[in-house]
């Protein structure tokens, strides 16, 4: 039995289980929550021990060790990704989205345009629009069942739409692409030509499967003026509620500018619990992560086989990275309303709606698979049973029809 097979029933206040959230988003609370991008697994023992050591000390005076944190991150990336990072080029922020919000404000002014590649993590829209900037969408293309960048559209919009910056998601959430070095080099070349700064959100950089290799924007030729949001140990080690974010800015002048802003807002004041947990994760957590990746890939392969045999109408874009799977339900030929009903009310699953990531993706949903395999199997069995039973059109009594596909 794997350490990741354990199902924990400890009482908690996790967001994914919050009845108010579930009721507000899905209309009911009795659903299996597979919507939010975090793990159901216990964190690695070295991280637990580092936290316990601090908790039992019972003294919490001022204490700072960002230098040790930056060295741990640098050493980890060199060993894991052959990425040579200068520990002095990091800026600590309270979280990844905080860092992106600061960078947008430093790189542009109100009314300027920021590009994203849709479908994409929905909070990007909020962080751009709340800063008074405009979202420009570069829609990813599906070619032979695989998402690809549309470089012609990128160049056309770089050239004509006053785009100051672009948020890159690598590995991409929700479609699971891990961008190749060739793709990133082509993107950097275009960005350099049109004076666009790339902000690369790399928070999932360590959740990459065997057939793929992660490449940071910081490893690409002539990328000195672009910024890697190296992220945090949040996704890698299941530390969402206790981790900071880290920006890697190799351009020294811009790094000083950002650091001055961050310090003026006191956004660089992490806490020693987060710092020591981060150091423990990056110095002692590699074996745990290797085991996790094997487990997640086993789960992903099980889902792929199950869908092919039992639910061929449901298409999974097999991820190269992240622990999310992007599911296309359009072959079921259900209305948007009927699809939501069968998933939530009949299968009793809480999946992230596809239109969060792009308004037109109403036939897609994202599923978090960082849960015990038994739970994932149960979820798909519930889905199969619901589809086999047929769509209960009673939810749509105002528009009675004999054809549930039109519900």
Image (cartoon, grey):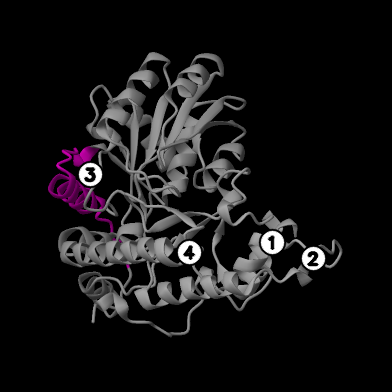
Reading the chain from its start, which is encountered first: label 3 or label 2? 3
For image coordinates 54% across by 63% down, the residue present is 351
Q: Is residue 118 magenta?
A: no
Nearest-to-viewer mark from 3 and 2: 2
**Which image quarter: residue 376?**
bottom left
| Residue mark closest to the camera, 2 vs 4 | 4
Task: State the residue position of label 3.
Answer: 213
* Residue 373 seen in render: yes
The residue that disc 2 covers is 396
Label 1 crowd (10 A; few <14 / some 14-19 / many >=20): many
Rendered location of residue 353, percent (x, y): 58, 56
**Disc 3: CA contacts within 10 A as few (<14), some (14-19) or many (>=20):** some
Distance in Å between CA atoms under marks 3 and 1: 39 Å
Q: Mark 4 to mark 3: distance in Å? A: 30 Å
The answer to whether residue 59 is above or below residue 223 is: below
Name the residue carrying label 4: 311
Of residue 302 and residue 4, the one placed in the foreground of this image is 302
Residues packed near mark 4 inside 10 Å, few (<14), some (14 to 19) or many (20 plus): some
Say which residue label 1 marks: 338
Horizontally, is 101 left or right of 181 in the view?
Answer: right
Q: Residues within 10 Å of mark 2 (few under 14, many from 20)?
A: some
């Amino acid at each position: 039995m794997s350490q990741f097979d354990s199902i924990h029933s400890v009482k908690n206040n996790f967001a994914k289980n919050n009845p108010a959230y579930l009721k507000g988003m899905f209309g009911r609370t009795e659903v299996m929550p597979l919507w939010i991008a975090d793990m159901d697994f216990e964190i690695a023992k070295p991280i637990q021990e580092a936290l316990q050591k601090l908790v039992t000390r019972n003294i919490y005076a001022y204490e700072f060790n960002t230098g040790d944190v930056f060295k741990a991150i640098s050493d980890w990336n060199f060993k894991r990704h052959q990425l040579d990072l200068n520990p002095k080029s990091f800026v600590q922020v309270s979280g990844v989205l905080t860092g992106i919000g600061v960078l947008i404000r430093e790189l542009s002014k109100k009314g300027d345009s920021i590009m994203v590649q849709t479908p994409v993590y929905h909070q990007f829209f909020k962080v751009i629009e709340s800063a008074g900037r405009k979202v420009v969408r570069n829609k990813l293309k599906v070619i032979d069942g695989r998402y690809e960048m549309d470089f012609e559209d990128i160049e056309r919009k770089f050239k004509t739409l006053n785009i100051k910056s672009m948020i890159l998601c690598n590995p991409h959430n929700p479609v699971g692409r891990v961008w190749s070095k060739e793709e990133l080099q082509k993107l950097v070349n275009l960005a350099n030509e049109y004076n666009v700064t790339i902000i690369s959100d790399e928070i999932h950089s360590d959740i990459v499967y065997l057939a793929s290799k992660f490449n940071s924007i910081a490893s690409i030729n002539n990328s000195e003026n672009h910024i890697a949001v190296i992220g945090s140990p949040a996704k890698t080690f299941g530390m969402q509620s206790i981790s900071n974010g880290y920006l890697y800015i190799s351009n020294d002048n811009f790094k000083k500018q950002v650091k001055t802003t961050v310090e003026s807002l006191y956004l660089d004041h992490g806490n020693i619990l987060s710092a020591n947990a981060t150091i423990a994760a990056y110095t002692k957590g590699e074996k745990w992560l290797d085991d996790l990746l094997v487990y997640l890939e086993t789960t992903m392969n099980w889902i792929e086989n199950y869908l092919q045999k039992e639910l061929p109408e449901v298409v999974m874009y097999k991820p190269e990275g992240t622990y999310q799977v992007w599911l296309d339900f359009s072959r079921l030929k259900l209305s948007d309303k009927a699809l939501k009903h069968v998933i939530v009310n009949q299968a009793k699953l809480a999946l992230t709606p596809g239109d969060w990531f792009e308004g037109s993706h109403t036939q897609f949903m994202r599923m978090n698979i960082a849960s015990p395999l038994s739970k994932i199997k149960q979820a798909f069995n519930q889905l199969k049973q619901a589809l086999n039973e047929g769509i209960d059109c009673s939810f749509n009594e105002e528009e009675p029809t004999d054809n549930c596909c039109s519900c």
